[in-house]
Image (tube, rainbow, N blue to C red):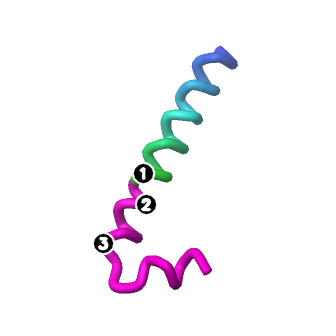
Amino acid sequence: MRCEKNILRRRNNAIVFLFLFYFTSMGPHPKALYS
């Protein structure tokens, strides 16, 4: 079950990262969030 949880957690992290990257890229000042 640990393997399944790790896979789900990794998948969730990837989705969140892609979502945040897409959302920030659509923002008016994406660089301001990183710096």
Say which residue label 3 marks.
26
Q: Is residue 12 above or below residue 31?
A: above
Give the position of the C terminus as an image quadrant. bottom right
The reply to whether the C-beta atoms of the residues labelled 2 and 3 are less than 8 Å apart is: no
Q: Position of residue 31 (x, y in %)?
A: 49, 79
Front position in the image: 1 or 29: 29
Disc 1 is placed on an element classified as helix
Disc 2 is placed on an element classified as helix
Q: Amino acid at mark 3?
A: Met
Q: CA distance from mark 1 to mark 2?
A: 5 Å
Q: Position of residue 7 (x, y in %)?
A: 56, 25
Pointer 2 or 3: first along the chain: 2
Q: Amino acid at mark 1?
A: Leu
Pointer 3 or 1: first along the chain: 1
Q: Is residue 3 above or below residue 30?
A: above
Q: 10 Å neighbourhood of mark 3: few (<14), some, or many (≥20)? A: few
Say which residue label 1 marks.
18
Say which mark, if any, is on residue 21: 2
| Secondary structure, magenta segment, majority class | helix
| Part of the protein shown in magenta | 19-35
Q: Position of residue 2 (x, y in %)?
A: 69, 19
Q: Quadrant of residue 5?
A: top right
Q: Is residue 22 above or below residue 29?
A: above
Q: Is residue 21 left or right of residue 4?
A: left
Q: 10 Å neighbourhood of mark 2: few (<14), some, or many (≥20)? A: few
Q: 10 Å neighbourhood of mark 1: few (<14), some, or many (≥20)? A: few
- In percent of the image, x 52 and y 84: which residue is there? 32
Q: Position of residue 13 (x, y in %)?
A: 54, 44
- In percent of the image, x 40 and y 70: which residue is there? 24
